[in-house]
Image (spheres, grey):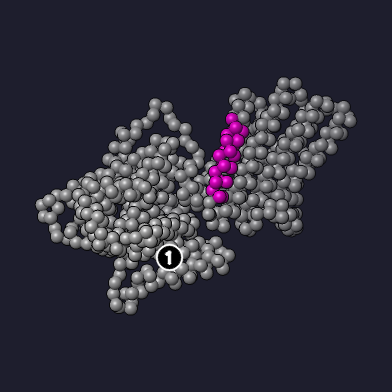
C-alpha cells in the first residue's frame, strides 16, 4: 500500500462522512413535518416509542442525532424520561438501515437484474437526477430531494473509494496480524468504542468496517465484538450533549449509555461462552458486507428484546445514579440540542412564543384594570410579566437567528421570520402595559382624577382594546386568518376613538372642567392604548401573511382596508359598538 492508496483512503473516508452528513440533513429537512407528527403521537406505549425512534433514525440515518434530539426533548419538557427510553431503543435498530444499504456494494453476480442492484450501477443515475433537482428546481422540497440523492451518491462513491484503497491491505502481514489481535473480544469492543467515539456515528463506523471487510482479513470473530463496541461509542455524542442540561436530560443520556453497555455486556458474555464451548467454524470465516449488516441488525434487535421489558428498571437505575437536587432546577425554555432537528426546534419556538403572547396580553389586561382598581399585587404582576416577556424576546431572538442560519426549508424559514417579527410586537405590548400602570400610579400619587365623562370614554376604548387583544391573540394561537381579518377594522375604530377623545378633552379644558395635570396623563394613556392596538394589527398582519406566503405586512393591511365590502361592514359594526353616544 503506497502513499497514493493512503490519499485515496483519506479522500474516500472524507467523501463517505460528508455524503452521510449531507444526506441526513436533507432528509431531516424533507421530512420535517413528518418528524413533528411522529413526536406529536408519542405516548407512554412502549411499542409506539420504539417504532418512533426506529422511524426517525431510519429517516435521518443517525442514532446519535436522534438521541441528541431526545436529550433536547427531555430537557425542554417535550418528552418524559420513560418515553425517551423507548425511543432510544428504537433508534438503535433504525441505525442499522445504513449498513444494509452499504451492503449492496458487495453484490457480485453476472445476472443483469442483480447487477442493477449494485450501487455502482445506479448511483450515477441518482447523482444526475439529484443535480438536476438541486440546480434547476426552485421548489425547496425538490431541491432537498436532489440533495438527498447527491448525498447518497457521494456516500457510495466514498465507500467504493475506501474499498478500492484498502483492497491491497489483505496481503500485508501487519494488517493480517492486526485483525488477528481483534479476535480477542475485549480488544474488539474497545476498538469499536474508540472508533465510533472519534467519528461520533455508529453508522459511519460500521461503513468503515464494511469497507475494510473487502480485504478478506476481517473475520466474523473480530467483526462482531467491534460492532458491539460501536454501540457504546455512539453514546459519546449524547453524553456530550447532556452537559449543562437539566437532570432529566442527563438521565436520558445515561439511559442510552446504560442500555448499550448492558446489552453489550450480556451478549458479549454469551458470545464468549459460545466461542469457548463450541468455537463455531464460521467465526474464522471472512466477513462480507452483507454479513456485517446482518450482525449489526441482529445484535441491536437482541439488545432491544432483552431490555425493552426492563425499561422501567433502567429509568429507576438512572434516577438513582443521577438523583434530584435539593433545589428544583430552572427549566430552560429553549434547548440548542433541538437545533439538530430544525423543524421541531421551530415548533418549540412557536410554543414559547405562544407563552410570551399570553403573558404580554395578560400584562396589558391587568394594567388596564389598575386604572380603575389599583392594587400593589396587580402592579407587581404587571412588572413581572413585562420582565418575563423581555426574557422571552431575548432567548427567542437569539435562538431564531441561530435556527435561521441553518439550512432549513422555505416554509420553515418564513415561519422563523414571522416569529422574529411577532416577538417584537408582543414585547412592545408588555412595555405599553407598564406605561399604563405608571399612568395609574401617577394618578394615584398626585391625586389626579378624570371627569365622569372622561371615565365613560376611557371605559369604551379600554373595552375596544381588550377585544382587539383577544382577536389578535386568538388569530395567532389558532393560526386563523379569518379572525385576523377582523382585527384591522377594529384597529381603525380605535384610532378614531383616540382622536375623538383628544378633541373632547380639549373641549373640557376650554370649559374648565378638566385639569392640565389630568390632561398629561390622559394623553399618555391614549397613546399607549392606541399603540398597543397597532401592535395587535401587526400580529394579525403576520398571521395573514403566512397564509398568503407574503411577508409584506403593510401591503397586507392595505389590501384588507381596500377590500371595501367586508372591511366597511366590520368597521361600521365596531364603530356602532364602541361609540360615545349618550345612552
The x and y percentages for residue 238 are 38, 44
Give the quarter of the figure containing the C terminus: top right
Q: Which residues are magenta?
A: 384-405
Q: Residues within 10 Å of mark 1 (few under 14, many from 20)?
A: many
Label 1: state its secondary structure: helix
Quarter of image, res 292: bottom left
Give the quarter of the figure containing the N terminus: bottom left
The x and y percentages for residue 9 are 37, 59
Quarter of image, res 430: top right
Q: Which residue is mark 1?
A: 153
Q: Magenta part mainly helix, strand or loop? A: helix
Q: Is residue 70 above or below residue 130?
A: above
Q: Is residue 248 above or below residue 212?
A: above
Residue at the (59%, 47%) spot, across then down: 419
Taking the magenta stretch, the answer to whether it contains residue 531 is no
Residue 70 in sight in this render = no
Residue 319 in sight in this render = yes
Is 239 on the left or on the right of 380, as rendered? left
Q: Nearer the viewer, residue 115 or 41?
A: 115
The x and y percentages for residue 387 are 60, 32
Residue at the (75%, 21%) spot, across then down: 446
**View extreme (right): residue:** 510
Is 71 on the left or on the right of 168, as rendered? right
Q: Nearer the viewer, residue 81 or 147?
A: 147
**View extreme (front): residue:** 2
**View extreme (left): residue:** 277
Is 140 on the left or on the right of 267, as rendered? right
Residue at the (79%, 27%) spot, across then down: 518
Residue at the (29%, 42%) spot, across then down: 258
Amino acid at each position: 500500500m503506497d502513499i497514493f492508496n493512503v490519499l485515496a483512503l483519506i479522500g474516500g473516508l472524507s467523501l463517505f462522512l460528508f455524503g452521510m452528513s449531507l444526506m441526513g440533513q436533507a432528509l431531516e429537512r424533507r421530512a420535517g413535518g413528518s418528524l413533528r407528527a411522529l413526536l406529536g403521537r408519542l405516548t407512554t406505549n412502549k411499542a409506539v416509542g420504539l417504532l418512533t425512534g426506529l422511524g426517525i433514525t431510519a429517516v435521518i440515518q443517525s442514532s446519535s442525532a436522534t438521541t441528541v434530539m431526545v436529550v433536547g426533548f427531555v430537557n425542554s419538557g417535550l418528552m418524559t424520561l420513560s418515553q425517551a427510553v423507548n425511543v432510544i431503543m428504537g433508534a438503535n435498530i433504525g441505525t442499522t438501515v445504513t449498513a444494509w444499504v452499504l451492503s449492496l456494494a458487495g453484490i457480485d453476480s453476472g445476472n443483469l437484474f442483480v447487477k442493477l442492484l449494485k450501487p455502482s450501477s445506479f448511483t450515477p443515475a441518482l447523482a444526475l437526477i439529484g443535480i438536476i433537482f438541486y440546480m434547476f428546481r426552485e421548489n425547496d422540497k425538490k431541491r432537498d430531494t436532489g440533495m438527498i440523492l447527491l448525498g447518497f451518491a457521494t456516500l457510495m462513491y466514498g465507500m467504493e473509494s475506501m474499498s478500492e484503497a484498502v483492497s491491497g491491505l489483505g496481503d500485508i502481514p501487519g494488517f493480517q496480524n492486526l485483525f488477528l489481535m481483534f479476535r480477542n473480544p475485549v480488544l474488539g469492543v474497545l476498538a469499536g468504542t474508540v472508533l465510533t467515539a472519534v467519528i461520533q456515528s455508529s453508522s459511519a463506523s460500521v461503513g468503515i468496517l464494511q469497507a475494510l471487510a473487502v480485504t478478506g482479513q476481517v473475520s466474523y470473530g473480530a467483526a462482531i465484538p467491534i460492532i458491539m463496541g460501536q454501540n457504546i461509542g455512539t453514546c459519546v455524542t449524547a453524553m456530550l450533549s447532556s452537559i449543562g442540561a437539566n437532570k432529566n436530560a442527563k438521565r436520558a443520556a445515561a439511559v442510552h449509555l446504560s442500555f448499550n453497555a448492558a446489552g453489550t455486556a450480556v451478549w458479549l458474555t454469551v458470545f464468549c461462552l459460545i466461542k469457548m464451548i463450541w468455537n463455531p467454524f464460521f467465526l474464522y470465516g471472512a466477513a462480507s458486507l452483507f454479513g456485517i449488516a446482518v450482525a449489526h441488525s441482529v445484535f441491536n434487535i437482541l439488545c432491544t428484546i432483552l431490555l425493552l421489558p426492563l425499561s422501567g428498571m433502567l429509568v429507576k437505575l438512572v434516577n438513582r445514579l443521577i438523583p434530584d437536587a435539593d433545589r428544583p432546577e430552572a427549566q430552560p425554555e429553549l434547548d440548542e440540542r433541538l437545533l439538530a432537528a430544525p423543524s421541531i426546534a421551530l415548533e418549540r419556538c412557536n410554543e414559547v412564543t405562544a407563552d410570551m403572547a399570553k403573558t404580554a396580553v395578560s400584562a396589558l389586561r391587568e394594567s388596564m384594570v389598575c386604572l380603575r382598581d389599583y392594587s400593589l399585587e396587580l402592579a407587581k404582576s404587571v412588572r413581572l410579566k413585562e420582565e418575563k416577556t423581555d426574557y422571552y424576546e431575548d432567548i427567542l431572538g437569539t435562538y431564531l437567528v441561530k435556527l435561521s442560519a441553518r439550512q432549513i426549508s422555505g416554509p420553515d424559514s418564513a415561519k422563523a421570520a414571522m416569529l422574529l417579527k411577532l416577538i417584537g410586537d408582543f414585547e412592545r405590548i408588555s412595555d405599553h402595559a407598564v406605561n399604563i400602570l405608571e399612568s395609574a400610579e401617577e394618578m394615584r400619587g398626585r391625586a389626579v382624577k378624570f371627569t365622569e365623562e372622561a371615565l365613560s370614554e376611557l371605559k369604551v376604548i379600554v373595552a375596544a382594546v381588550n377585544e382587539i387583544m383577544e382577536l389578535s391573540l386568538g388569530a395567532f394561537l389558532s393560526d386563523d386568518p379569518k379572525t385576523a381579518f377582523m382585527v384591522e377594522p377594529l384597529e381603525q375604530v380605535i384610532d378614531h376613538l383616540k382622536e375623538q377623545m383628544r378633541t373632547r378633552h380639549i373641549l373640557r379644558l376650554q370649559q374648565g372642567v378638566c385639569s392640565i395635570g389630568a390632561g398629561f396623563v390622559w394623553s399618555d394613556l391614549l397613546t399607549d392604548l392606541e399603540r398597543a392596538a397597532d401592535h395587535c394589527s401587526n400580529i394579525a398582519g403576520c398571521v395573514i401573511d403566512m397564509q398568503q406566503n407574503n411577508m409584506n405586512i403593510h401591503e397586507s393591511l392595505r389590501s384588507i382596508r381596500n377590500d371595501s365590502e367586508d372591511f366597511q361592514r366590520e368597521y361600521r359594526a365596531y364603530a356602532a359598538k364602541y361609540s360615545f353616544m349618550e345612552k
